[in-house]
Amino acid sequence: MEHLLNVTTVLSILLLLMVLISVRRAHIRVEYSVSWLLASVTMLLLSRSKPVLDAITRWAGVPDTPLTLFLISGTLFLIMFFRFSIIISHLRDDNIALAQRVAILEFHLRSLGNHEK
């Protein structure tokens, strides 16, 4: 169990560092990095506080503490993926609307050009 918690700690720290480096290099926008930072800090705190993890295990009725850790991490990442799916959907809708507006402007410019001739 202790080895699993150590591995989770290392992975959480790596994720935290990757996100911070990506923000610093402008590979990811700050508003999108917050979710990743919260997830990595949550996993780091859970992997370092075994009594809290044991209490969650008892409360949830899960048979094993490592399983609780993976259920929590899986749930966190599913929520994040769902959030990013919503963001991507909005961006796609915005792109379609923008493309339609550009097409309308091009149509108006062509019609203005035809009227001048």
Image: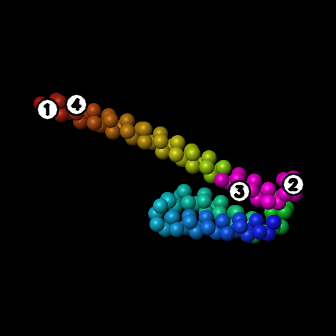
> What secondary structure is found at the residue carrying circle 1?
helix
Q: Amino acid at mark 4?
A: Ser
Q: Residue at x 53, y 58 (%)?
A: 31
Q: Quadrant of the C terminus?
A: top left
The answer to whether residue 100 shows anywhere in this view is yes
Dot placed on the residue nearer the N-terminal end, 1 or 2: 2
For residue 111, which numbered disc appears in the image? 4
For residue 73, which numbered disc appears in the image? 3
Tell me the residue that label 2 is attached to: 63
- Give neighbour class at mark 4: few <14, some 14-19, many 20+ (Cα, 10 Å): few
Tell me how far mark 3 sits from mark 2, CA to CA.
17 Å
Q: Using the image as rendered, state which of residue 94 and residue 45 is in the foreground.
A: 45
Dot placed on the residue nearer the N-terminal end, 3 or 1: 3
The answer to whether residue 59 shows anywhere in this view is no
Which residues are drawn in magenta? 57-77
Q: Using the image as rendered, state which of residue 1 and residue 74 is in the foreground.
A: 1
